[in-house]
Each structure stands twice: as C-alpha cells, then as structure tokens.
Amino acid sequence: MEHSKAFVIASWTLRAIAAIILLQTLFFKFTGAKESVYIFTTLGMEPWGRIGSGAAELIASILLLLPQTVVFGAIMSLGVISGAIFFQSGSCMAVHPRSEARSLLTEPCDWRNGSYCRAIQRQGRIDTFNMT
C-alpha cells in the first residue's frame, strides 16, 4: 500500500520526535548524573535500573527509526514510558522541585502520594530535598 507524501512526512516527524525524547535522557543515565542516580537510588534500582532503562531507551529509539521495526520500537517505547510512569507515580520521590530530576510524570500523582510522603517524612524515613 502506498502512503501519501503528507503521511510519510508526518510519520517520520513523529517517530523522530519520539526517538529524540528517548535519546536525550541517555547522557544523564549513562554518565551517572546525580539527578538520575538519585531517582534510581530512591527506587532501589541503582545502578542496574538506570543503565538497563537507558539501554532499553536506546534500543527503542533505534527500532523507531528503522522502517522495518517501527512497530517493535513503538511497543518497546510504550513499555519504557509505562515503566517510568509506574515507578515514578507509585514511589515517594522527594526530589527538589527545581531539580531536573523532578519529572512531569510525578506532578499529577502528587495529590495521591502527597499525604503518604508527608507521613513518612515526619517519621524520618526519607530525607526531603537531599541531593548530595
């Protein structure tokens, strides 16, 4: 089946945007940036979770850009982002609000996690805003 020129351009544009979004985090994950290390330490998955998720993002972005594997890349990208949403929305990540580690994915979930986080902060079980 032959696709129109507009469809092909839109398809490549959207695939490139998704791949760029996935690729931009690799520098922070593979170099061990303190924000990335902090997130995965909070989740109890440092360093294998950080490096493994970075490898999965790299593979997904490559698959998205290859015409023969775009479906697999889309499925893998959906898995990567679903994992990020699951782990970040279900955890109590006390990250400084001005930090780059503060994810847009966690902000909508603050209403749900807020009271739980405040309760364990009062008990001294997590250290709020500690980015050292």
Image (spheres, rainbow, N blue to C red):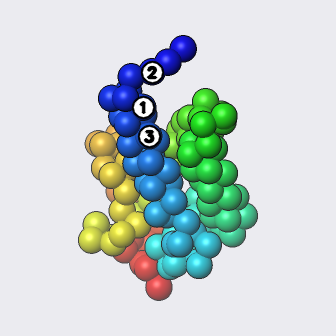
Q: Residue at x 33, y 72 (%)?
A: 99
Q: Is 30 displayed left or right of 8 in the figure? A: right
The residue carrying mark 3 is 12
Q: Please provide percent x and percent y for residue 78.
A: 54, 36
Amino acid at the residue labelled 3: Trp
Observer-nearest of 130 and 30: 30
Which numbered marker is on residue 8? 1
> Dot 3: what SS?
helix
The image quarter containing residue 130 is: bottom left
Question: Residue 119 at x, y = what percent?
Answer: 39, 55
Residue at 72 percent across and 64 percent down: it is 48
Residue 46 point in image, percent of width and height: 66, 67
Q: CA distance from mark 1 to mark 2?
A: 7 Å
Looking at the image, is mark 2 or mark 3 nearer the viewer?
2
**In the rendered structure, which disc, 1 or 2, sits on the residue that comes first in sequence?**
2
Q: Which residue is mark 2?
A: 3
Task: Determine contact: label 1, label 2, CB under 8 Å.
Answer: yes
Q: Give the total of numbered labels.
A: 3
Q: Is residue 98 depicted above or below 77 in this figure?
A: below
